[in-house]
Image (tube, rainbow, N blue to C red):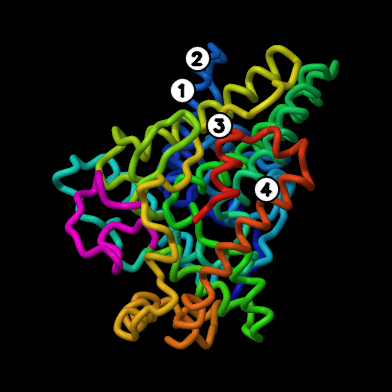
């Protein structure tokens, strides 16, 4: 199969233009829906008028804010790559019809989200996750996916949100209209990139999986990066997934998942990738993520309109979740002495994933068993690493809600 290093969005727009003639906006997927909803909420509050779509650096196509959020963090390593149309380093387009599949998949997601809750199951329309989710997982693993996980995604968000605010102020103070417009678009793309990692923070499987620690331990144990990625995925897929293997009770879509809380003392049950809209948009797991994006975009608009960067904690980080004290610890869900039957069940749950050509990980049930045995130490390392980073980067940490920081220093 022929591979391509074409810019992902350029390839996507070629297909969109061919199929839709540019007349119909692209609107589907979780990151995208949340991004658009949050941006609209912020623009309305700030009376900013229409917020997008926004042109990239040179191309004629325009993206909605949600599209920027959806595509950025999974297909591009930086907001500059996204804005300047840098070709993807990943062979994510393996066949000529992949983009056609992607478009159909996202259309199906959009239609599914709008169904009455009673007509939904616990899965998205395509049981095989189609290209969109496969491509997302390819890229997260291939690009060292640690930044997508809890604590790390908050730091990535804060760094790029700060950069976006500086660009917004710079744009507002630029005397040249053309340069001002370019800088403002760059600020929007940078903030959309930041908001991708912000919205990752609301997915249950991303909240407390010790991704960095598993990668470090796996390397020391002689395992390759792909195998480490698979072990991370085992935890990612099970912690908070509706009907997860570890759940022996029947949960409804509203009470199943991972019980979380945030700095605003809001409590809800968040769910894994692909399950956010199980009960529709009017659900705390959706609404809280939308409010976070709205906070982020509102600060961006404020920086542009008032020509100053807000001080102190970024508002969106007050909405980021961590496990509720009543939620069982991760080492309880994955005990060090996990029995072989559960190990085999976990292995079966990711067996299909091992067949994907990009991975090629030689995973075995024994690897899962070893990971569980080391999990108590990995979680202790996670807490220690957070504490060290708090001391190392005080200016960045000051941008995060202190309750969030304290929660991750005690993550379990």
Q: CA distance from mark 3 to mark 2?
A: 15 Å
Mark drawn on residue 82? 4
Q: Is residue 211 left or right of residue 278?
A: right
Q: Main secondary structure of the magenta part?
A: loop
Q: CA distance from mark 4 to mark 2?
A: 27 Å
On the image, numbered disc 3 is attached to which residue? 316
Determine the secondary structure under disc 3: helix
Can residue 401 be seen at all in this image of the molecule?
Answer: yes
Q: Are marks 4 and 1 in contact (CB under 8 Å)?
A: no
**Of the residues under marks 4 and 2, which one precedes in the sequence?**
2
The residue positioned 65% from the left and 28% from the top of the image is 313
* Front residue (pair 352, 258): 258
* Rendered view: 175 above or below 262: above
Determine the secondary structure under disc 4: helix
Residue 240 is covered by the magenta coloring:
yes
* The magenta segment: 239-258
Q: Are marks 1 and 3 in contact (CB under 8 Å)?
A: no
Residue 49 is covered by the magenta coloring:
no
* Rendered view: 173 above or below 56: above
Q: Are marks 2 and 1 in contact (CB under 8 Å)?
A: yes
């Amino acid at each position: 199969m022929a591979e391509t290093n074409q810019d992902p969005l350029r390839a996507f727009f070629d297909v969109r233009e061919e199929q839709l003639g540019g007349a119909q906006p692209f609107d589907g997927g979780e990151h995208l829906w949340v991004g658009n909803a949050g941006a609209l909420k912020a623009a309305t509050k700030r009376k900013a008028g229409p917020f997008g779509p926004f042109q990239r650096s040179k191309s004629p196509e325009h993206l909605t804010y949600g599209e920027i959020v959806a595509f950025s963090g999974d297909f591009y390593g930086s907001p500059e790559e996204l804005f300047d149309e840098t070709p993807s380093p990943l062979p994510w387009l393996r066949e000529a019809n992949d983009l056609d599949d992607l478009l159909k998949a996202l259309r199906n997601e959009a239609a599914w989200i709008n169904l009455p809750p009673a007509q939904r199951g616990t899965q998205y329309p395509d049981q095989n996750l189609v290209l969109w989710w496969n491509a997302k997982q390819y890229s997260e693993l291939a690009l060292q996916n640690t930044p997508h996980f809890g604590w790390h995604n908050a730091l990535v968000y804060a760094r790029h949100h700060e950069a976006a605010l500086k660009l917004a102020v710079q744009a507002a103070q630029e005397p040249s209209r053309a340069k001002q417009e370019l800088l403002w678009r760059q600020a929007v793309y940078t903030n959309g990139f930041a908001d991708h990692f912000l919205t990752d923070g609301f997915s249950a499987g991303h909240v407390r999986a010790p991704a960095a620690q598993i990668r470090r331990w796996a390397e020391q144990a002689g395992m390759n990066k792909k195998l480490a990625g698979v072990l991370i995925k085992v935890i990612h897929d099970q912690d908070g997934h509706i009907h997860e293997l570890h759940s022996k009770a029947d949960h409804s879509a509203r009470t199943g998942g991972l019980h979380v809380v945030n700095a605003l003392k809001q409590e809800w049950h968040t769910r894994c990738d692909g399950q956010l809209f199980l009960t529709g948009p009017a659900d705390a797991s959706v609404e809280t993520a939308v409010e976070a994006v709205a906070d982020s975009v509102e600060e961006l608009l404020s920086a542009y309109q008032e020509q100053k960067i807000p001080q102190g904690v970024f508002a969106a980080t007050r909405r980021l979740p961590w496990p509720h004290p009543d939620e069982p610890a991760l080492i309880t869900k994955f005990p060090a002495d996990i029995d072989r039957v559960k190990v085999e069940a976990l292995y079966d749950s990711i067996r299909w994933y091992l067949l994907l050509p990009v991975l090629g990980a030689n995973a075995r049930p024994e690897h899962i068993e070893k990971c569980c045995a080391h999990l108590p130490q990995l979680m202790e390392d996670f807490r220690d690493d957070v504490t060290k980073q708090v001391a190392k980067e005080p200016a960045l940490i000051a941008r995060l809600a202190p309750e969030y920081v304290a929660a991750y220093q005690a993550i379990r």
